[in-house]
Image (cartoon, rainbow, N blue to C red):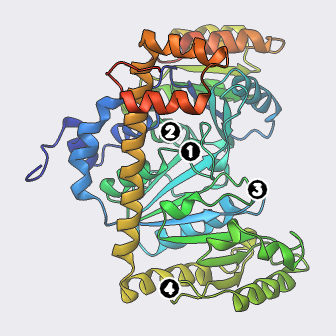
Amino acid sequence: MRGRPRLTQAARQVLAQDRRVLGRLISAVENRDPKVIPTLRALYPRTGRARVIGIAGPLGVGKSSLLNGLLAHLRAAGRTVGVVAVDPSSPFTGGSVLGDRIRLEREPGDPGVFIRSMASRGHLGGIAAATLEVTRLLDAFGMDFVLVETVGSGQVDVEVREVASTAVVVLVPHLGDEVQTLKAGLFEIADVFCVNKSDLPGADLAAKDLRELISLARSTGGWTPRILTASARDGVGIAELWAAIEAHERFLDEAGTRAATERRRLSAEIVGLVTERVGHDLAESLRRDPRLSNLLDRVLSREVDPHSAVEQILRAGPRRPIRVP
Amino acid sequence: MAKTANAPPVRVLIAKPGLDGHDRGAKVVARALRDAGMEVIYAGLRQTPEEIVESAIEEDVDLIGLSILSGAHMALFPRVLALLKKRKASDIPVFAGGIIPDEDAKRLRKIGLKAVFGPGTSLEQIVTTARGIARHRA
């Protein structure tokens, strides 16, 4: 495609700071409504300016409270902030209670803040499937920073890495001994560690364990994760936490790795979208194909095994007949 | 993006306007709506009408539920409805629960509240009504 895509009505309204339209677009993205794609297409050239910061960590460690501290800190500095707070959906009913707003305070009527709660809707990894696209909408809306708070599911809460340029992992004292810090997953993604609830005993020990972990680890791309303590409740350590986040953002620019990271991320996104589309189309055409039923009978009677059935389906392609030997 | 076969979940904001510390009812209702498959944005205690309407717009909810015990419903609820109108969001229906005299409930319904639940209402009835009055997406 050449030139800028034509602005849709909704895109124009987002650029004109219409909060209602932004809210509705976010829902459309969450609901995977294909009608929203022309608007996403129109807004994409206006994205890439906002910095996305991820806040991950187990449940109850104070992610929302720290985020609230960062929000106040950034607003005091005149920066605009979008917040995406993800909470889990029930695997049984699909319902959810999204409770992160309770901890987020703001000046009444402040247009420089937009907060959106998201249910994970069955997506694992600590964020929702639509989180990346939602951060992009907030970027197009003109937010300087987008703070993404993860579900807080625990050790595999790592996918925020795929949407954020800086990942903060929040911990508290007494989460376990130093062997925990050796485990794979959450501890691997941090650019900044924050030991929250530092007013509790044991915070210094937790920070020391983290320092030991980091001394053992090879530094990834020249950045050594920072380790800080904070007490979000008392507003202690917030400025230092933001300084560490900014230091990492500066590092990305100075080391020239930002573009490479984004390229890798976009590649994953596009491959993912293609896979989803192709998989969906193939599944749809298969469901309508009477030859699948025939093949199923033969798998059921142990004449053909499932792997050979897959081979035959793939060899046939979506709209060609499935050849069964 | 592939279209999912299932309808998207109903999004509902549950909030307690004004100075009122009694949030047990709101939590019980939030939980019941969650178990009915809805996405409940729980805004919690001491919300101003302005905060409630802003949350409803940012969260793009299909329904707002207000819980109240303080007796200030005749001051706070009409304000929420007026602000929704001002923000061109009158299409978001509002229901309420709590200690609201019948006479007031009647007047509130007249100005646009879709349902008012008093003590003793079954959760089943609240869920069914909520589902019935929630905004349907185009």
User: Mark 2 belongs to which subunit?
Assistant: B
Give the Cα distance between marks 2 and 4.
38 Å
Q: Are marks 2 and 4 in contact (CB under 8 Å)?
A: no
Foreground mark, 1 or 3, reads 3
Q: Is residue A125 left or right of residue B25?
A: left
Q: Dot 4: few (<14), some (14–19), or many (≥20) neighbours within 10 Å?
A: few
Decide if residue A103 is in sight here. yes
Residues behind callouts 4 and 1 on a single chain: yes
Badge 2 crowding class, 10 Å Cα cut-off, few under 14, some 14 to 19, many 20 or more, is many
Q: Nearer the viewer, residue A145 or A289?
A: A289
Task: Tell me the distance, in whole angstroms, between the alpha carbons under discs 4 and 3.
Answer: 29 Å
Query: Mark 4 or mark 1: which comes first in sequence?
Result: 1
Badge 2 marks a residue whose secondary structure is loop
Horizontally, residue A32 falls left or right of residue A229, namely left
Q: CA distance from mark 2 to mark 3?
A: 22 Å
Disc 1 marks which residue?
A117
Numbered tag placed on residue A221 in the rendering? 4
Which chain does the residue under circle 4 lie in? A
Q: Amino acid at mark 4?
A: Gly
Residue B59's disc number: 2
Work out whether mark 1 precedes mark 3 in sequence or the reverse, and give the earlier one. 3
Q: Which residue is depicted at the point 63% across and 26% down?
A: B38
The one nearer the camera, A295 or B113, is A295
Q: Which residue is mark 3?
A: A59
Question: The disc labelled 3 sits on which kind of residue?
Answer: Leu
In this picture, is B20 found above or below A58?
Answer: above
Q: Residue at x 51, y 25 (%)?
A: B8
Residue A229's image quarter?
Answer: bottom right
Are callouts 4 and 3 both on one chain?
yes
Residue B89 occupies quadrant: top left
> Where A170 sits versus B110, above or below?
below
